Amino acid sequence: MSELTFEQMLEESFKTIRNGEVVDGTVIDVKPDEIILNIGYKADGIITRSEYTNETNADLTTMVSVGDKMSAKVLKVNDGEGQVLLTYKRLAAEKGNERLKEAFENHEVLKAPVAQILGGGLSVVIDEARVFIPASLVSDTYEKDLSKYQDQEIEFVISEFNPRRNRVIGDRRQLLVAERAEKQKELFGKIQVGDRMEGTVKNVTDFGAFIDLGGVDGLLHISEMSWGRVENPKKVFQVGEKLEVMIKDIHDTKIALSLKFPETNPWANAAEDYAVGTVITGKVARMTDFGAFVELAPGVDALLHVSQISRAHVDKPSDVLSVGQEITAKVVDLNEAEKKISLSMKALEPVAEEKAETESVDEGAAE
């Protein structure tokens, strides 16, 4: 057997590597755009910025230090300059996909910050493996603007796993639906009609407002917002506003709410406040051809019939009255059961005979 030269023995002392092989190494130098690894081979390993991270302008000197141990995958044994081209990112992604596969099979709940807002949803990264969450699976309600999720840590499950087609789909919606169902079950087990709760205005529409009672929404209909008249709920309530509401009705999974608390009922003392014969002031709220409705208090409207406006003939209320005008009238009828009050301005005017007699006395005094 012939003796080996020093160079041959040195060559034999280094291990052999192949493309696709995973190697372990130690960082011996770091530049902003590349990492140099001693991998126990005759040539050092090089990891470029693009093969370490997806951050295009990342400074690798802030992410890796000399002496760090790491594993990488061989892309090319010889990059043309006698060095071994390695990838850290792809190896990490492969390990990440194994992690996602395991989570998919076990229906595991994952948690990760949102890495990117895309046109059709969110992108999150688990161990360098990307997961796409479509906009329809981000929330249990329609989300018009997803930008609020940027960098926010969210929980989700893997609903579809097909890395070969680059299709790994996350689902946050099913977790929220399940959570809402649990909260709903808990809430319905302890609430009763008449209970008062604090809620948060979640959405305001033309017909009412949806109030979050702690994971369960209740509807505050426009007719239940005040004892008085509310024309536009959007001018009264703001999203995020805190309210104390009363549970008016519970039907299956629907909750009807009210702000008409019994102690604020303007009809509670109607027998005293609006007794027949009482002279009262109010503002004309609206008019019809047959009369004017006068607001005596929020939630209390009285009818001033056209025949009761004046002793003189009045064709239409709008001929002598205007909306917003303050008038004084006498209560001539009260029906508490039907919440109806009738007024008369005419009853406060002197009768014709009294006027004639007064005029006669005045003339005699003048003579």
Image (cartoon, rainbow, N blue to C red):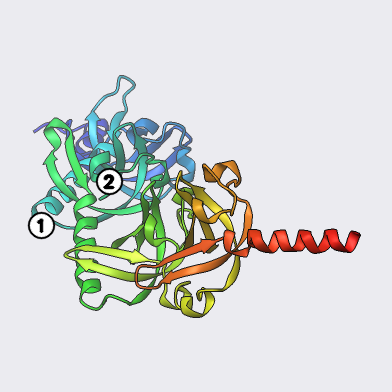
Instruction: Quadrant for the N terminus, please.
Output: top left
Q: Secondary structure at mark 1?
A: helix
Res. 318 mark:
none
Q: Which residue corresponds to the image point at 58% horizontal and 59% vertical from the top-left?
A: 346
Type of amino acid under label 2: Val
Is 44 on the left-hand or right-hand side of 273?
left
Is 106 on the left-hand or right-hand side of 63?
left
Crowd around label 1: few <14 · some 14–19 · many ≥20 (10 Å): few
Res. 138 mark:
2
Q: Which residue corresponds to the image point at 41% horizontal and 41% vertical from the top-left?
A: 147
Residue 105 is situated, as x and y percent measured from the top left of the image, at 8, 52
Residue 213 is situated, as x and y percent measured from the top left of the image, at 34, 66
In this view of the protein, which residue sits in the foreground, 153 or 306?
Answer: 306
Q: Secondary structure at mark 2?
A: loop
Is 268 on the left-hand or right-hand side of 174?
right
**Which of disc 1 and disc 2 is earlier in sequence?**
1
User: Circle 1 is placed at which residue position?
Assistant: 106
Residue 169 is situated, as x and y percent measured from the top left of the image, at 19, 41
Q: Which residue corresponds to the image point at 32% horizontal and 77% vertical from the top-left?
A: 194
